[in-house]
Image: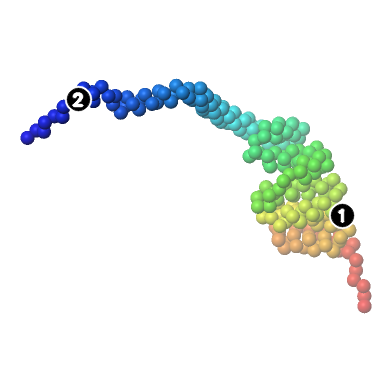
Amino acid sequence: MALPRKRLLRKEIRQPDRFQVAMGRCLKLITAYRTQLITIGVALVVAGATAGGWYYYRAYQQSLALQDYNRGLREYSEGRYDSALNTFKRLQSRGVVEYTALTDIYIANSYMGLREPAKAVETLSGRILNDHDGFLTQVTLVGLGLAQEINGSCPDALDTMARALKLQGPLREEAMLAKARCHTELGNTPVAIDTYREYLKEFPDGRTVEIELLLMRLGAKAPKPSSP
């Protein structure tokens, strides 16, 4: 049996429903805070546009940085150190963090190619090195040590190479040879001999003949033990 329909009173019909009430309240809020809402809306639009613009700007800078890096590598490999130096300095000015360490290394190497070791030392000595990044830190330290050696500062080079030898990386051989050369230059013949012998044990396929000849010459210079 169907239930009788409830009869609405005229007073109830005149009352606004919940939707109308809610909309009315919203309109009042919008009217009251119109200026603030407009400001917020504009701020959101500007923020979105800025974020989008920054994304495209960064992507553009990344693209230019990659072009500079490849161009600099080509110029450096061809021995055009002046051009490579300018290219890597331009890359450095772009401020793309991913290329910072490599850029400094190639700037220093370009100075070395131009026979300006003092500028190479200045470039690399200002680097903030992170020993946890073994590969790049060792490359930087060995480059700095070689520049110091060529610049006539073997004591500094020995300190730098000692730090490089504590790290894992591909340039341990170069660091050991530089250490031996500097000890030779400073007249520390016994230490130089020990370093070359250590090198031969660790790198038996290295510059064996050359090192053996050096050891013969150093042995002739080494002080003879006094007889009892």
Report the mark closest to the observer, 1 or 2. 2
Which residue corresponds to the image point at 23% horizontal and 25% vertical from the top-left?
A: 12
Residue 169 percent location from the top left of the image: 67, 53
SS at mark 2 in the image = loop
**Nearer to us in this view, 134 or 34:** 34
Q: Is residue 87 visible?
A: no
Residue 213 percent location from the top left of the image: 82, 58
Q: Where residue 185 is drawn, which disc sits there?
A: 1
In the displayed structure, 118 sits above or below 83; it is below
Q: CA distance from mark 1 to mark 2?
A: 112 Å
Q: Could you tell me the amino acid type at mark 2?
A: Leu
Q: Quadrant of residue 23?
A: top left
SS at mark 1 in the image = helix
Residue 105 percent location from the top left of the image: 72, 42
In the displayed structure, 177 sits above or below 150; it is below
For residue 26, side relative to residue 101 (left or right): left
